[in-house]
Amino acid sequence: MQEQITAPSSIGQKLQPYVSFIGPMAMIVAILLFMAVVEPARYFRVSNLNQILLDAALYMPMAMAMTFVITQRGIDLSIGSVAALSAIVMAFLIKQYAFPVPVAALIALGLGALMGLINGLVITRLKVPDLIGTLAMDLVYRGIALVLAKGLVLARFPELLTEIGRGQSFMFLPTPVVIGLITMLLGYFLLTSTHFGRYTIAIGSNPEASDMTGIAVDRHRVYAYVLMGTMAALAGILLTGKLNAIQATSAPYFNLHVIAAVVVGGTSLFGGRASIVGSLAGVLLLSMMINALVTLRIEFFWQSVASGVVIIFSVALYTWLQKKDRDGVAGMASLFKYPKKSKTFRLFAIIVASLFLLTIVGILFSGDIKPSG
């Protein structure tokens, strides 16, 4: 007697496969609606929408590769330095040694792959945790870039490089957007149609079981870091073409932005769950959010605050949607139900209330502001 397969009974179960895409898309719609009310003329100009796409394109290749790294329970904090060092080497080859742009760009991509390979070997052979290993290599690569550049800003490159970074391939799509979308399509193919993608999911779900089934876990983890290094180098090339300049201190926040986009897109930090489409949506969301803050004339430093808040709420949302605690109550709702967890919530509320009251007291008893100096 065959078992009868029942369809998902609730709306939540039916939407479960699409959560990674629905979450960021809902926030994108919210931003569009908000800006349509507050600043429609400035935000929805063609030039501004084109700028959003250009900003997003810079992160698309790295978000694709970071999806594989994070899905395998890894992390890469060195991608900003990899991008900067690769771009610095390419710039020197073009400016000082008259290398053709295609040749110099291929060397930069190869250098990025080499740095990714070094990261992978540090993690798998020396058994250094991903977080510490890539953070240490970030210092190494950034230091080498600083030594090579010696404080110089390399600028004014051949037209071919600027075309790659900000040119128009078609009537409505800039060249870097086309490049970024191609890398996303490549990542989608790798994830859904190759052994590498299937092994990535398996390794992230259970590394020990994957190793017992014959999957070369360490080797595939190295492959993911090589891909990450190559895509970081590609981002460095795009950045150089976009700005028509590069320096050793460029791309300091690449890692945070890319990790945020991937996590917002639904890829689990605990491994085993990935979404290339979600990562693309996450990249677009963060670019639109930052552009909205700029359009609203919000200070630059608040952009970091907003990015951090989005990351926290996104991770909390996915945890709440996809996991139940042992008593059957979902995520954050359990804070209000169980005594032990409600104590934690009350402590949090007391601390926040205390800070608020202290701020009010400080304002009430503050004197006139005296000019400094």
Image: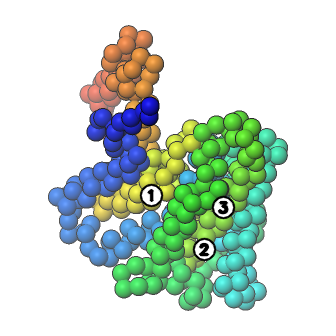
Front residue (pair 24, 239)? 24
The answer to whether residue 84 shows anywhere in this view is no
Mark in the foreground, 3 or 1: 1
Crowding at label 3, few (<14), some or many (≥20) Cα neighbours within 10 Å? many
Mark in the foreground, 1 or 2: 1
Q: Residue at x 66, y 72 (%)?
A: 87
Q: Residue furthest front?
A: 1
Q: Residue at x 52, y 61 (%)?
A: 188
Q: Residue furthest top?
A: 339
Identified by mark 3, the residue type is Leu
Quarter of the figure with residue 183: bottom right
Which corner quadrant holds the N terminus? top left
Q: Which mark is residue 237?
A: 2
Mark in the foreground, 3 or 2: 3
Q: Residue furthest left?
A: 37
Q: Which mark is residue 277?
A: 1
Q: Which mark is residue 227?
A: 3
Identified by mark 2, the residue type is Ile
Alpha carbon distance from label 1 to label 2 = 24 Å
Q: Residue at x 70, y 77 (%)?
A: 106
Element under disc 3: helix
Q: Which of the two discs, 3 and 1, labels the residue nearer the N terminus?
A: 3
Q: Which of the two discs, 1 and 2, labels the residue nearer the N terminus?
A: 2
Q: Where does residue 66 sit, x and y in percent of width and height?
A: 58, 54
